[in-house]
Image (cartoon, grey):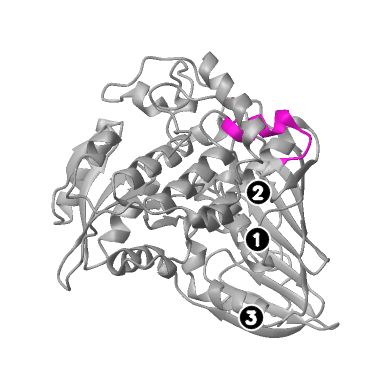
């Protein structure tokens, strides 16, 4: 790492607490004034989408369901992917977008109103900050940051440039889950003292992949961006970058951030005071660096002197369902007790990993003084009340996260966002603290006021840049 980077990292430890790093301290910042576009009834929000191979293609499809949005540009470092997506759009009769492979080209395009980011994690914050600085609103996929510090910088940039930044934790826009959280606030299960996030995905081994030539049409130096430039292998590239520390955050930062966000949201907490994580990479011998099994415990000191707990678990392979989650949607398809074993599956080989379908157990469980609530991770909740666990209120409703973002952009009202970046950053902080605790092998005591780990410089440096640094010129700025 360059000497200047080392100085910046050391300086962060000296000044972090003194500069009032808490998000509350940002309220006094004067927004930079700039002319805002006023959307008329028939004006379209022009969106550029970054990274369109996987989740980014979902973005394209989602925006095309909205009558007041134009997907104006696609940006992907793999020209093979962008060419395919343009062809896919033309086959559907959709307007042909412009294309590029360098995100900085989009920042210079004043006709673009908003950007939608679905790149690998290590690019999320930097592209989003650039977009804020260029006067564009942002939909940023989860996690909003590859490390804690750049997430804080993104939240600051959103406030400084008065940009609307929606975090891609779409459960916040699920009518069913929003109703469930409201029921928790109303006391349907009494005093909520514990939440659990479940991330059980049947992910097969990624194996070992050799070093090879960079595929034609791939701008690999640009793909690497802020991370150290390493020899190209398929396990460092499409999708499997999730399992490499320099570019991903493991499954807790992949699928798990959704459930972590719901667990924190339902529990009604902000920053933790203590985080401890243990786990490992079990069963498989492959190139994966991140843990495929992880158990996390977070403790929160509350203003009334009480404490709350959040537990999170990642399982990577064959496992049971819990509380009916994974056995089918909650809208009438699971048993009333909600705790029965899953039904036997038909014989034959099942798809694993992202396509495991009903094998996966993705959701949340909340425990209160009067009952239990389970959420299926998508759009529904169920409750069981009292000593006899009698069925209580249940509900479901669809998710409209992209529509919520566009509505807020058109109305220029940040308070309309269901998942503002400040909330996303808080939830991602739990992910980063958990990964740091796992990697360092110790409990971390966090001070919410200074946003520093108490008495642990090594942990704070890891939260600062993942112990990785930034590669010029792809550097998250010290001053946004």
The x, y position of residue 255, in whole percent, is 55, 50
In magenta, the rendered stretch is 453-467
- The N terminus lies in which quarter of the figure? top right
The kind of secondary structure element at disc 2 is: helix
Kindly identify which residue carries mark 3: 183
The residue nearer to you, when weighing 480 against 95, is: 480
In the rendered image, the quadrant that contains the C terminus is top left
Looking at the image, which is closer to me, 327 or 400? 400
Q: Main secondary structure of the magenta part?
A: helix
N-terminal of the pair, mark 2 or mark 1, is 1
Residues tagged 2 and 1 counted as in contact (Cβ below 8 A): yes
Disc 3 or 1, which lies upstream in sequence? Answer: 3
Q: Is residue 479 above or below residue 163?
A: above
Residue 224: which quarter of the image?
A: top left
Work out whether 25 lies above or below 122.
below
3D distance between C-alphas at marks 2 and 1: 9 Å
| Residue found at x 57% / y 27% | 207
Q: Is residue 370 left or right of residue 122?
A: right
**Looking at the image, can residue 83 be seen?**
no
Residue 214 sits above or below residue 250 on the image: above
Q: Are marks 3 and 2 in contact (CB under 8 Å)?
A: no
- Residue at position x 26%, y 32% in the image: 101
| Spatial CA span between label 3 and label 1 | 15 Å
Tell me residue 105's x, y (percent).
23, 35
Residue occupying image coordinates x 59% and y 39%: 250
Total marks shown come to 3
Question: Given this view, does label 3 or label 2 mark the residue nearer the observer?
Answer: 2
In the picture, the disc for residue 430 is: 2
Whether the magenta-drawn stretch holds residue 454 is answered as yes
Q: Position of residue 312 (x, y in %)?
A: 71, 53
Question: Does dot 3 land on a helix, a strand or a loop?
Answer: helix
Residue marked by disc 1 = 264
């Amino acid at each position: 790492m360059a000497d200047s980077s080392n100085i910046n990292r050391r300086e962060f430890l000296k000044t972090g607490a003194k500069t009032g790093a808490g998000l509350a301290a940002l309220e006094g910042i004067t927004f930079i004034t700039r002319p805002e576009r006023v959307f008329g009834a028939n004006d379209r929000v022009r969106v550029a989408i970054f990274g369109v191979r996987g989740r980014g293609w979902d973005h394209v499809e989602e925006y095309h369901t909205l009558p007041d949005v134009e997907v104006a540009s696609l940006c992907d470092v793999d020209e093979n992917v962008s060419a395919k997506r343009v062809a896919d759009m033309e086959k559907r009769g959709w307007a042909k977008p412009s294309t590029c492979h360098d995100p900085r080209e989009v920042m210079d395009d004043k006709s673009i109103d908003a950007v939608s980011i679905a790149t690998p994690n290590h690019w999320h914050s930097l592209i989003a900050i650039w977009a804020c600085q260029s006067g564009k609103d942002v939909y940023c996929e989860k996690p909003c940051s590859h490390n804690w510090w750049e997430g804080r910088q993104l939240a600051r940039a959103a406030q400084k440039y008065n940009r609307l930044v929606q975090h891609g934790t779409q459960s916040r826009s699920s009518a069913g889950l929003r109703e469930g959280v409201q029921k928790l606030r109303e006391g349907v299960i009494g005093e909520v003292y514990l939440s659990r996030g479940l991330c059980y995905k049947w992910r097969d081994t990624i194996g070992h992949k050799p070093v090879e030539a960079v595929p034609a049409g791939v701008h690999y130096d640009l793909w690497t961006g802020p991370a150290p430039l390493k020899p190209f292998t398929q396990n460092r590239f499409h999708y499997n970058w999730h399992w490499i520390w320099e570019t991903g955050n493991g499954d807790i930062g992949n699928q798990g951030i959704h459930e972590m966000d719901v667990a924190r949201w339902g529990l009604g907490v902000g920053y933790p005071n203590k985080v401890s994580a243990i786990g490992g990479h079990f069963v498989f011998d492959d190139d994966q660096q991140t843990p495929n099994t992880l158990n996390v415990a977070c403790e929160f000191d509350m203003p009334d002197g009480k404490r709350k707990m959040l537990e999170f678990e990642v399982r990577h392979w064959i496992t049971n369902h819990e509380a009916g989650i994974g056995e089918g949607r909650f809208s009438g398809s699971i048993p009333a007790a909600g705790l029965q074993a899953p039904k036997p599956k038909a014989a034959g080989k099942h798809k694993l990993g992202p396509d495991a379908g009903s094998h996966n157990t993705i959701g949340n469980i909340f425990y209160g003084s009067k009952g239990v609530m389970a959420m299926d991770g998508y759009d529904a909740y169920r409750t069981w009340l009292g000593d006899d666990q009698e069925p209580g209120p249940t509900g479901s409703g669809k998710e409209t996260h992209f529509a919520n973002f566009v509505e807020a952009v058109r109305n220029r009202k940040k308070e309309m966002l269901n998942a503002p970046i400040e909330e996303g950053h808080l939830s991602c902080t739990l992910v980063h603290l958990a990964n740091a605790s796992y990697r360092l092998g110790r409990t971390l005591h966090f001070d919410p006021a200074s946003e520093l780990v108490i008495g642990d410089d090594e942990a704070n440096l890891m939260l600062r840049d993942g112990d990785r640094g930034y590669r010029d010129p792809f550097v998250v700025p010290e001053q946004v």
